[in-house]
Amino acid sequence: MVRGTGGDAEVIGSAGRVRVDRGDGGGAPTRDVTVWHPTRAARAVGVVIEDADPYRLVDRVVPPVRLADADVARWEGRLAGAWQVLRDGHPQLAAGVDAAVSAVVPLPVAQRFRSFSATSGDAVGSVELTEPPDPVDGAATLAHEFRHTVLSAVLHLCDLIDPQAPPVLRYAPWRDDPRPPHGVLHGIYAFFGVTEFWRRQRRLAVGADAMLAHFEFALWRGEVLDTATEMLRTGPLTALGRRFVTGIRTTVQGWLPEPVPVETRRLAELATADSRALWRIHHLEPDSAAVERLAAAWAAGAAAPPAAVPARLVPDPGARALDTRASLARLWLADRDAFRRTERAGPGREYRGASAADCALVAGDRARARQGYAADVQRDGDDRRALVGLGLAIGDGEPAGWTLLRRPELVRAVAAAAVDRGGEAPDPSALAAWLLPASVQPDEPDASGQPDVSGQRLARDDAAAAARLIRE
């Protein structure tokens, strides 16, 4: 019960009573007085800046962390800038965000190109958000979380994923970890919104900002299309879910003919291949008996048996920052001077796991990148990031590059088995080229009965390319 007493109030409950002062500076509160702090809001955009609710974070309960007035003012400015980008260039999206987002939970600023945001299906309308570094980044993040908010509301009304289906973990290109079907579906819809945002923003931006926008559009239209296609092929969708994902896939297919600058396409394709190969080398484990047979054949100087080697999902909890090269690509496009400073200072200081070879690869110097990655692997034979980087530098037009990008987990496993048998560490390029006949992923469930969850089933043209490389 709450009882008013003039300008103050008394809150009475089963545990006792507390006097609440209105906190207007009318006298110093005594020890038995709790000062009331009003909820702050970003007045220009009409959302609450939520720093007190103990349930404001998606994954845990936390005490209030009252922002200083200067911080609130800065956040008001950041949010006003992001909303202005939406209202000026994306009016329909702005209307949706206005209607759907009612509270922003402020989080500290993140590393450049790694803004974090989150929503919860149990708190529709609230968005956790790291402080936007610029208005466009803030607008893109709101576009992303708006789609999550909408889908969360839809999923309260109907099932898009079969509730009886087992939650088999799958590849999602926007995450380091394998994701359950609901998570993949959320990502498809959220990044569909992100793609749509960048599709329009690239026509409004100029200079380096336009190049970055073209890159984001090129990257995410491909990733959304591929993930939606695989979800339709093997995902546990209901009839309504299939209709929903088909609509997304059809829309994105219509965007494929839209041109982007050559450099942004190159880097988007590099980021896509990198993400998939790194996910595989961290989370897939080839059949151990097949690996031993291959290691024995390698040691004997025989040809690789042409039998496909299945792999099973073994999530690696230590997989982190699989987007490092993509972040460097964004820096290269957005701020060439900052890229060069990062390169000179040591890219690993700025981006976890980044190397000089990564900078060379992003800058288009594949020969220097290949040399750098080979040296990195020689120093550490289990450097998974360098092994995939070597495949990117070689390219999938050569047998070694093809295998390192399509089956990096197999190259890593056979190399380790060869060493365990008492042999020298194989040259990774030579081993990868030798493994090409065994690198075709079987188009069938593995021994556990699970379908391929990597999102990388070989298309017919991929298989044909592998056959050509083998013949050559």
Image (cartoon, helix red, strand yellow):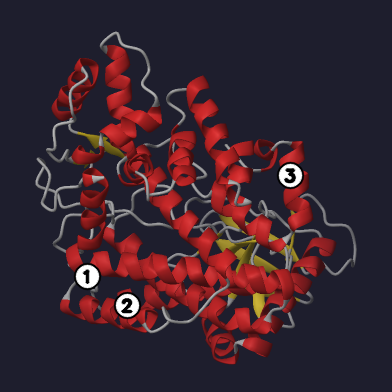
Kind of residue indicated by mark 1: Leu
Front residue of 316/78: it is 316
Q: Report the Cα–Cα distance between label 3 and label 1.
A: 41 Å
Callouts 1 and 2 close, C-beta under 8 Å: yes
Q: How many other residues sit within 10 Å of disc 3, few (<14), some (14-19) or many (≥20)?
A: some
Quadrant of the image containing the N terminus: bottom right
Q: Residue at x 41, y 44 (%)?
A: 278
Residue visible at 72% across and 42% down in the picture? 343
Q: Tell me if residue 444 can be seen.
A: yes
Q: CA distance from mark 1 to mark 2?
A: 9 Å
Q: Secondary structure at mark 2?
A: helix
Q: Which residue is mark 2?
A: 249
Q: Is residue 84 left or right of residue 459?
A: right
Q: Earlier in the sequence, mark 1 or mark 2?
A: 1
Is the residue 34 above or below the residue 419 in the image? below
Horizontal and vertical percent for residue 371?
55, 33
* Residue at disc 1, secondary structure: helix
Give yes or no for contact between labels 3 and 2 (Cβ–Cβ under 8 Å): no
- Front-most of residues 348 and 176: 348
Residue topped by disc 3: 342
Specify the quadrant of the image occupied by residue 89.
bottom right
Q: Nearer the viewer, mark 3 or mark 2?
A: 3
Q: Using residue 246 as the reference point, say whether residue 88 is left or right of it.
A: right
Q: Nearer the viewer, residue 402 or 301?
A: 301
The residue singled out by tag 1 in the image is 232
Instruction: Decide: few, some or many residues near mark 1? Use Cα within 10 Å; few <14, some 14-19, many ≥20.
Output: some
Which amino acid, by three-letter code, is at mark 2?
A: Arg
Q: Residue 141: which numbered mark, if any?
A: none
Q: Nearer the viewer, mark 3 or mark 1?
A: 3
Q: Does residue 8 appear anywhere in the picture?
A: no
